[in-house]
Image: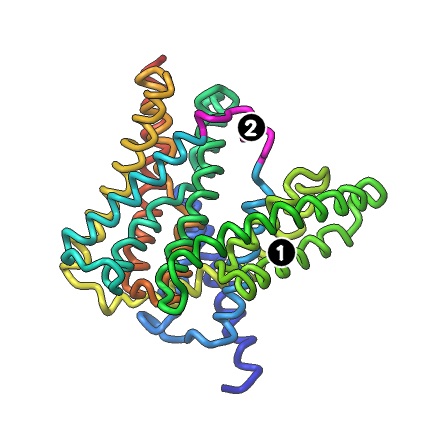
Amino acid sequence: METYEIFKDLAIIIIAAKCCGLLARKLHAPMVAGEIVAGLLIGPSVLGIVAQTDFLSQMAEIGVLLLMFGAGLETDLKDLIKTGPKAVLIACAGVATPLVGGYLLYSCYYGFAPNGSDKFYEALFIGVILTATSVSITVETLRELGKLKGEVGTTILSAAIVDDIIGIIVLTFVIGFKSSSVSPSKVVINTVLFFVFAICVGMIIYYLFKLLDSKRPHSRRIPIFGLALCFIMAYVAEKYFGIADITGAFVAGIILCSIKDSEYIAEKMDISSYMLFGPVFFASIGLKTNIDGISTKLLIFSILFVIVGLITKIIGCGLMAKICRFKNKDALRIGVGMMTRGEVALIVAQKGLAVKMIDSVFFTTVILLIIVSSLITPIAMKLLYKSGD
């Protein structure tokens, strides 16, 4: 392939992703769903005008890191501390229930496999995909209803943040356990050591950035150094601890989320992510999705996957909210508010494909869950608030 051909591919991806993304938004669906559909349309499965290359895969990997770095930057540690134990308990239940539900669904459907086998890890990874929560649509709905700043809204937001952190940790462990060259105890030790390293080094880096922020506020060097930190933490995580690079990028965002210019860094990162790396990442999922492999059996599994994905979040988060002494209706609102899936679920699925834990045909299943949950959640939330307190 000639070097200049990549410019044509990038132009097609950007135009198709943005057009399909805007169309999706007009239809009240997530823009990312439109960008994935764009990848399907221009990829080998439909039109065949763009093919997945090593260069596009590397661009997509950068897009993943920027998305996770941005997610870390948007974490509000003060709100997290304020909602405290309740949000943590709800998040833990919101991870554990879908994880078990996804594993049992796959195992019951495709057959139970012995511990340690490839099929066992595939079943476990299906559960891991279901752990992620994306509350951007829920937040927008709560803001529209004027309920975002209430106890329920704050709890949903905080629980979703903790949910993603726990989900990334679970992902790290599962990928580590899948590696036959590393013992389970080594995986646990490496993961603990990485987070100890991240806390110790993170404190130093935080104060350095805080000092730079006070002397040169809103200067371009701050997001530049922030981006460098993102890549360094991703490299260190993979190279020295055997941890997923996206974990390192997410931790880099957490380190900087409390400095004054965190929003400024996120704003600058968003430009690159929104214009280039984000569309390439989401379109690449469409490019890699194998719709030729969709059978009636997989379609039925996909429908069951969506049902289990929605119900397990309501049961896990809703019951724990009830245990935390929320009213019945508020507990149900919290459960429903945690149903949506988005970018993190896709990132987890992408990582699973990269390490050969799942087949590319399951991307269709994940995409269906994202679209359905994104459409159902705001409607359900409005109905729950319309019925009164």
Q: Can residue 34 be seen in this view?
A: no
Position of residue 334 relative to residue 289, above or below, is above
**In the image, is residue 71 part of the stretch drawn in magenta?**
no
Where residue 163 sits, quadrant-wise, is top left
Dot 1 crowding, Cα within 10 Å, few <14, some 14–19, many 20+:
many
Look at 37% across and 59% down and name the residue there: 177
Q: Nearer the viewer, mark 2 or mark 1?
A: 2
Query: Could you tell me which secondary element the residue under label 2 belongs to?
Result: helix
Q: Earlier in the sequence, mark 2 or mark 1?
A: 2
Q: What element carries label 1?
A: helix
Tell me the distance, in whole angstroms, between the alpha carbons under discs 2 and 1. 24 Å
Residue on which the image places disc 2 = 81
174 over 289 or under it: above or below: above
Horizontal side of residue 7 vs 200, given as left or right: left
Type of residue at label 2? Answer: Ile
The residue where tag 1 is placed is: 230
Check residue 137 in the rendering and tell me which mark sits there, or answer none: none
